[in-house]
Image (tube, grey):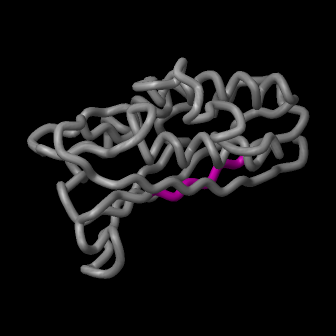
Amino acid sequence: MGRLRSGLGYDAHRLASGRRLVLGGVEIEGTDRGLEGHSDADVLTHAVIDALLGAAALADIGAHFPDTDEQYRDADSVELLRSTLERVCDAGFRLVNVDATVICEAPRLAPYRDSMRRRLAAALGLSERAVNVKFTRGEGMGFVGRGEGIAALAIATLEEGGDGHGTS
């Protein structure tokens, strides 16, 4: 077994009217506000991307998919995640697992947990057992607590010298 490396990812976006709410590649129904951003603004997937890049010491999401580049306007973040995993594997790493937390006041996300895990695991070439998604609230504090936005944190563990995509 090669040396293990971990990376931490964080993302936050403001909520805006007239946008779809997409988290972990899953569209959340029954809300009139989504996340504002250049791509689909999927904070969960963006945090996972940054965690992967951090563990591999490959800069950050903005370096690979800049919001000044029109080719990424309204991009599907799960496709960006697949591209990121390819870069990480090409750099000589194998993904072991991902753990993430979404922080928002509303809507309730627990009914979407399994769909998010399945979508992320499929994009990452991992079993669902190797991808965890959790939810918490801001308890009325800060921009999340006031319902102004949603944030996400993620950690990814890579194995150096791996043969590419995870098979956990």
Percent x, y for residue 72?
52, 24
Q: Nearer the viewer, residue 160 or 83?
A: 83
Query: Quick check: is 151 in the magenta stretch?
Result: no
Q: From this view, report whether residue 72 is shown above or below residue 53.
A: above
**Residue 96 visible in this rendered orientation of the protein:** no
Q: Is residue 36 left or right of residue 33?
A: right
Q: From this view, report whether residue 44 is shown above or below residue 101.
A: above
Residue drawn at (77%, 44%) of the image: 59
Percent x, y for residue 46?
52, 42
Main structural element of the magenta stretch: helix, strand or loop?
strand
Q: Nearer the viewer, residue 70 or 24?
A: 70
Residue drawn at (64%, 40%) of the image: 61
Residue drawn at (32%, 81%) of the image: 141
Q: From this view, report whether residue 119 is shown above or below residue 15.
A: above
Q: Nearer the viewer, residue 143 or 47?
A: 143
Percent x, y for residue 8?
66, 57
- Splitting the image into 4 quarters, where does residue 112 fall? top left
**Residue 140 visible in this rendered orientation of the protein:** yes
Q: Is residue 92 left or right of residue 52?
A: right
Residue stretch rendered in magenta on the structure: 152-157
